[in-house]
Image (cartoon, rainbow, N blue to C red):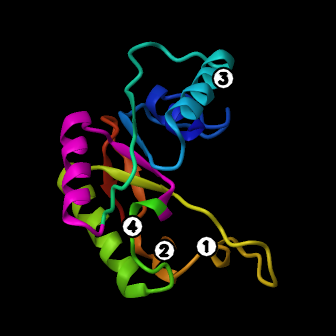
Amino acid sequence: MVAARSVASGRAFLGHFPTVQAPVLVVDQESHLAKLQERLRMLDRADPLPRDTPLDLVVTAGLYLDDAAGHAQLDAWLRQYQPAVVFLDSFTRFHRAEENSSGGMADVHASLRQLGQAHGTAFVLLDHTRKRGLNNEPEERLRGSGEKGPSWTRRSTWKPAGRPTRSSP
């Protein structure tokens, strides 16, 4: 939530990493509304945001990107809110694919790529990691298929308007 607030307000992330202000949508399928509201009040007490900060939140359940209805619902929210960045929390709740199946995860990522390209939107996928083990490299701690790793994404740069543009991979 801190990263979403930083981008929406244009403030430095963690007080150090510069951001460019851009509209943000957070779609949360992990928190209950009351818990999320309390978290937001706590963050706002510590660092109040202006009332017109372009930060929208949707708390939902049962939205699956590998399902036509879920894809359509997210598409509708992207049209409604017009975010430059969408945070999906927690990614594991946004699909029914087997996390260890590269084919199943590729279908989920294809859905996100299509939506991102259609709306000029970047996605931040918040996900759980594996428990610590023999190999604790960050990319090895991702749960499931390597398809979930950074290989499917494109690096983005930000234009002044806050919309992502592709750069070389």
Image depth: mark 2 or mark 4 in front: 4
Q: Nearer the viewer, residue 105 or 146?
A: 105
Q: Residues within 10 Å of mark 4 (few under 14, many from 20)?
A: many
Residue 141: image quadrant is bottom right
Give the quadrant of the C terminus.
bottom left
Residue at 59% x, 33% y is 35
Q: Which x, y percent locates residue 57? A: 41, 34
Q: Amino acid at mark 1?
A: Leu
Image depth: mark 3 or mark 2 in front: 3
Residue range highlighted in magenta: 66-92
Mark 4 secondary-structure assignment: loop
Q: Are marks 2 and 1 in contact (CB under 8 Å)?
A: yes
Q: Nearer the viewer, residue 157 or 117?
A: 117
Image depth: mark 4 or mark 3 in front: 4
Which callout, 4 or 1, points at the residue further toward the start of the chain?
Answer: 4
In the image, residue 99 above or below residue 5: below
Which callout, 3 or 2, points at the residue further toward the start of the chain?
Answer: 3
Q: Amino acid at mark 2?
A: Lys
Residue at 43% x, 62% y is 155
Q: Which mark is residue 148?
A: 2
Q: Which mark is residue 154?
A: none
Mark 3 secondary-structure assignment: helix
Which residue of the protein is positioned furthest toward the right in this rendering? 134
Q: Which x, y percent locates residue 86? A: 38, 46
Q: Which mark is residue 42?
A: 3
- Residue denoted by label 4: 95
